Image: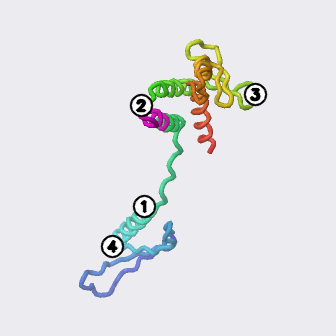
Amino acid sequence: MQKVACQPNNSKPGPLGEAACSMNTYVEVPTLGRVQVTGRGASGLEAAQHLKASVEALQTLYAPAPVPAPPTREARLCALLACGLTKALTASETPDYPLVERLLKAVSLVVRGMVQPGERAGLMAVESDTTRGMWYQIERLQCTCRDFKRHLERGNDRFYCKHVLAVLLNERINAEQGA
Ligand SMILES: [Zn+2]
């Protein structure tokens, strides 16, 4: 507030009833700039109360929208899972339930911190779900696990095992976190 002045209004009451006291001030309001606000009342206190209420109402109405908090790691993982599940269930006429299962296992690997950087750049390591302490190596969407090899031998070179999916999910949530 820059200026507050109480000016007793001594003129004769108008048809709407002039207030005995009025106060003016100027406030900076986002998007409006400098705005003059007047509070009127039968007494100085009442005028001040009306002025205060008007200033607060203006500031509340024009308050800048709060910046939403960035989504948590869990929220990003949920969003990615929902996206993956939708693709698995709707990309073709028959729902790909084995892919749904691999996606869920991949999320489980990410949540439990079983996806780790490998020994060199570009190489990732994912711990086995069944044999703890055993790590599979993943590079360029290729995995050293049996499931991946079996599909590759059958000519399916676009197969994503749960470890590859876990690496992809982990990469995405880390990239979004840094963004
Ligand atoms: Zn694998």
Q: Which residue is mark 1?
A: 60
Quadrant housing residue 169? top right
Where is residue 148? Give x, y as percent: 60, 22
Q: Which residue is mark 3?
A: 120
Q: Residue furthest right?
A: 120
Inter-mark Cα distance, 4 to 3: 78 Å
The three-letter code of the residue at mark 4 reads Ser
Q: Main secondary structure of the magenta part?
A: helix
Q: Which residue is mark 2?
A: 94
Say which of marks 4 and 1 sits in front. Answer: 1
**Whether the residue under disc 3 has CB within 8 Å of ligand 1:** no
Q: Residue furthest bottom?
A: 12
Quadrant housing residue 109? top right
Magenta segment:
83-95
The three-letter code of the residue at mark 2 reads Thr
The three-letter code of the residue at mark 1 reads Thr
Say which of marks 2 and 1 sits in front. Answer: 2
Q: Residue at x 25, y 81 (%)?
A: 16
